[in-house]
Image (cartoon, grey):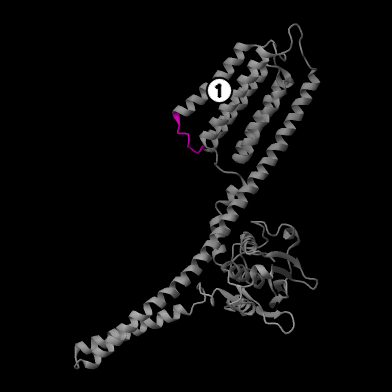
Amino acid sequence: MTLAAPDTADRLDRTAAGPRQGAGAPGERLRLRTLVSLRWGAIGGQMLALLVTRFLLGFELPLGGCLAVIALAALFNLALVLALPPQRVLVQWEAAVQLGFDVLQLGALLFLTGGLTNPFAVLLLVPAILAASSLKGRDTLILAGLVVATMLFLAAASKPLPWTSGVTFVLPRLYRYAAALALGAGVVITASYARRAAAESARMELALHAAESVLAREQRMSALGGLAAAAAHELGTPLATIAIVAKEMARESPPGPMREDAELVSYQAQRCRDILRRLAEAPDTDDMVHARVSLPQLLEEAAGQDNEGDEGVRVEWTVVGEPDTDPPEMIRHPEVGHALTSFIENAMDFAATEVRVVGRYDYDHIAIEVRDDGPGFAPEIFAKLGEPYVTSRPAGENSPSGHLGMGLGFFIAKTLLERTGAEVKFHNARGGGAVVAIRWPRDVIEAPPD
């Protein structure tokens, strides 16, 4: 069984089909200001390390060449600041070129100060990690290759490490190649981790945005229902007055156009009153009666919506509780109704003949269980259920709902329920079929006494 939310979540799945490319591989997200700021920090750190090594520690080093390399980075930064606006979002090749310059500039500085024997050689990992978390795959691979090539070059040829006067600090060539191999492995491992973390963050961000959109829509619909009921209440009196006056005019007017117009006004006023009365009867209002719903009523509303239009699978609901007690009344949360409807609809997509919805309550908890008689949760996705974009549905084929099946539905429904204080669990039943279990502490979801 794979879960995909109805209606709104289905549209969000379609919308997410484009951005999902960005979720799988980081997109263009680096601003010029970010790289310029990082480069100024690197320039400051290089200058500080250079001056401390030469004048505080007294080590001999090619000061002029090192200052020239650092000045080149400063000129590059100034040129970028003067040529481009700082808030500019860099396209892929622009960010890759800048990060490549940083690799070559740091490599040149390391070449003058000992190559891979210099402890600061580990900083070559930084551009590769930044590229992995911000650029697409090809650019990341090119930049990682440039970093590894720079390390191999530094292992083969570099100036001696700055050391005390009269002493030359040179490590064996084998050690330098081993250091290059270790740093190259570090590039691969850290860049892979950064890329995976960035992709997961992008996926979660998109999915949370979808959940926020669904919740906002449900809340707007609830608020609209309350507004309609208030408008019906306020407009009832003036419409009644119009109807009475129109009837009096029709009764006192002689036969003719005047009486016909008065009768038309009376008829239209009565139509308006009927429409407003139906609006006032809508359940989504903010008064004390409509702000609460009994557990049986909640299950009936959710199961009733999904029974419509589907003749192959029946939905049955029951309520089980403490003996000699009435079912509890719950706070009417729009997100609860949306999530429960989503779970039932998806259970119908995978059920063979029946979906059972069971409400349970005791003195401490209120629980709802949605169970179908289908094949159950697929083993390959069972461990990841609850994460976005986890699905085994083949693009909505042979599905009564016709959802694209990107896996957002379960994530959205679970997120909405958890915001109401619910605990959501899922498992496969022993006799077959998938089970989604929702449970609230009673004091969290139960409506206060009248």
> Looking at the image, can residue 174 be seen?
yes
How packed is label 1: few (under 14 Cα within 10 Å), some, or many (20 or more)?
some
For the point 67% across and 11% down, the residue is: 61
> Looking at the image, can residue 97 be seen?
no
Q: Residue at label 1?
A: 73
Is the stretch drawn in magenta largely helix, strand or loop?
loop
Quadrant assignment for the C terminus: bottom right
Q: Quadrant of residue 208?
A: bottom right
Give the x, y percent position of residue 42.
Answer: 60, 26
Quadrant assignment for the N terminus: bottom right
For the point 67% across and 18% down, the residue is: 111
First to last magenta residue range: 83-90
Give the x, y percent position of residue 87.
Answer: 48, 37
Above/below status of 324 relative to 161: below
Q: Quadrant of residue 361?
A: bottom right
| Residue sitting farthest toward the top | 166
Give the x, y percent position of residue 345.
Answer: 62, 71
SS type, badge 1: helix
Give the x, y percent position of residue 379.
Answer: 76, 61
For the point 41% across and 77% down, the residue is: 233
In the displayed structure image, the side of residue 6 where residue 320 appears, left or right? right
Query: What amino acid does circle 1 point to?
Result: Ala
Q: How many marks?
A: 1
Between residue 293 and residue 447, name the one nearer to us.
447
Between residue 265 and residue 210, name the one nearer to us.
265
Above/below status of 180 relative to 372: above
For the point 73% across and 29% down, the residue is: 183
Between residue 325 and residue 371, name the one nearer to us.
325
Q: Quadrant of residue 189?
A: top right
In magenta segment, residue 295: no
